[in-house]
Amino acid sequence: MNKEINLDEVVITPAILFAWSAHCRKIVQELGEKGLLNRNTVISEEKAELGPNGVLVIFIFIAGKRVEMAFPQGQWQMPKNN
């Protein structure tokens, strides 16, 4: 099992932010086209998991569907005081 971490404690590159945002927009558009989104759709807060191989997985839940994207070491870091 991966260790869940607070995404607020992770420093990410602008490339990760751009890729993650684009990925989420694409998923939201797809769900909208399928009629699975409405005003009451719950979108969870962003969270992250740290995999045993150092991969950071950012994820959210939209309409009960887990949306995730993995990023390798070197594109993110946790400050040393965490």
Image (cartoon, rainbow, N blue to C red):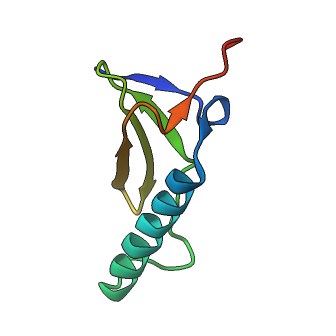
Horizontal relation, residue 76 to residue 27: left or right = right
Residue 66, above or below 8: below
- On the rendered image, what quadrant is the C terminus found in? top right
Residue appearing at x 30%, y 18% in the figure: 52
Name the residue rendered at 36%, 24% in the picture: 54
With 40 as the anchor, is 1 left or right in this view? left
Tell me: 73 left or right of 52.
Answer: right
Can you tell which quarter of the image residue 63 is in? Answer: bottom left
Q: Residue furthest front?
A: 74
* Residue 59, percent from left and from top: 43, 46
Q: Residue at 55% x, 71% y: name it.
A: 40
- Tell me which corner region of the image, top left, top right, bottom left or bottom right, holds residue 57: top left
In the current view of this chain or complex, which residue is farthest to the top?
81
Q: Quadrant of the N terminus?
A: top left
Q: Is residue 73 above or below residue 33?
A: above
- Residue 73 is situated, as x and y percent measured from the top left of the image, at 41, 30
Residue 21, image x, y percentages: 52, 64
